[in-house]
Image (cartoon, rainbow, N blue to C red):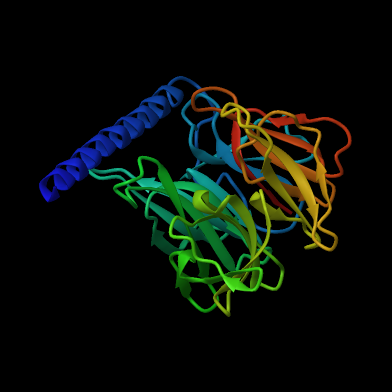
Amino acid sequence: MRKRIIIFAVCVVVLASVAVGYTLYALHRDKARAAGGEGVRPVSGAVDITPGGSARLVFRDTAKGVGFGRLAEVPMGRPGAVRKVDTQACERSYAAAGRLLCLAGENGLVVHHYAELRDSRMKLLKRIQLPGLPSRARLSADGRMAAWTAFVYGDSYTSAGFSTRSGIYDSRTDTLVPSLEAFKVQRDGKAFAPPDRNFWGVSFMKDDNTFYATLGSAGSGGTFLVRGDFAARTMTVLRDNVECPSLSPDDTRLVFKKKVSGDPSKPWRLYVLELATMKETALAETRSVDDQGDWLDDRTIGYSLPAGSSAFDVWTQPADGSGRPRLLVSGAYSPSIVR
């Protein structure tokens, strides 16, 4: 029996390695295709994340051409203007208060991914190796707190899917928490620590201590909104069916994605949650949004939707559920505002 278990485990690992290898191959193949041809040529220092001046949208360029995968920007007042493209490459990015969190890969025999915190001149301040493929990135409003989520494969021999791991870095105290799984969680006043728990989609309040995130546990009913206390290393479950929360500039609302369908092609819809009353409002976008939305201002939500094998577009919609979605920038992903 022991021999059979070992053989089964080895087979699972081999098959998993093949699956991951093909996924990575397909990603690199699509990137190579997308980077071919013309486009806006990257220039070092082209993207300015220094606070002040007119508002700019900073994003990952996914337009086909030589700038694919690089950091880019357009003025918010003229989103259709020719974009500026930097030489800095990011899989996912977020800019705030003159800082940039860039989740980037380093090519080699083995591809490693890193969370890189950079200043307004793109000088590297901190580099932290990620445990897997980049998924989400977020900074606090003052740029002090950084959070990221990565897809991780192989946490369990009994699971053939991905899990996630989220970490937080406090740049003022140089404190790193590589995984939120180290935090104690309470639900209805009792300890809540399902063995299959995962965390993703962190968003910070202005106090640089309180944060919101998603806790996922298939064995416990799905996904949950948690409020965290960084200093105390604790989290509290607030409600279920909430993913990828993002705090409004005034810290009173969350935009999040909610599972509304069992159809794997369109499972989610964006909602806004009033934290004081826990009242939720469905937004006008009816397409499934697999993204951590961002607040472009107090009244407007920005988010990414796929537009091809490697391309994305950035869309906006009102945060009160009125109006309709509007295309902001084509060939763009992972948006954030610099103002």
Q: Residue furthest front?
A: 1
Locate residue 27, reporting x and y percent: 39, 31
Measuring 35% from the left and 40% from the top, which residue is drawn there? Answer: 160
Residue 166 against residue 37 in the figure, above or below: below
Residue situated in front as seen by the camera: 329 or 260? 260
| Front in this rendered view, residue 330 or 138 | 138
Which residue is at the front of the view, 188 or 71? Answer: 188
Q: Is residue 298 left or right of residue 199?
A: right
Q: Quadrant of the C terminus?
A: bottom right
Residue 271 location in percent, x, y?
76, 44
Q: Is residue 126 visible?
A: yes
**Figure disc tally:** 0
- The structure residue drawn at horizontal position 38% and vertical position 46%, both measured from the top left corner, is 105
- Name, please, the residue furthest toward the top: 37
Residue 174 in the image: x percent, y percent? 48, 76
> Within the image, what quadrant is residue 252 found in?
bottom right
- Image-quadrant location for residue 33: top left
Q: Residue at x 48, y 57 (%)?
A: 197
Closer to the camera in the image, 180 or 304: 180
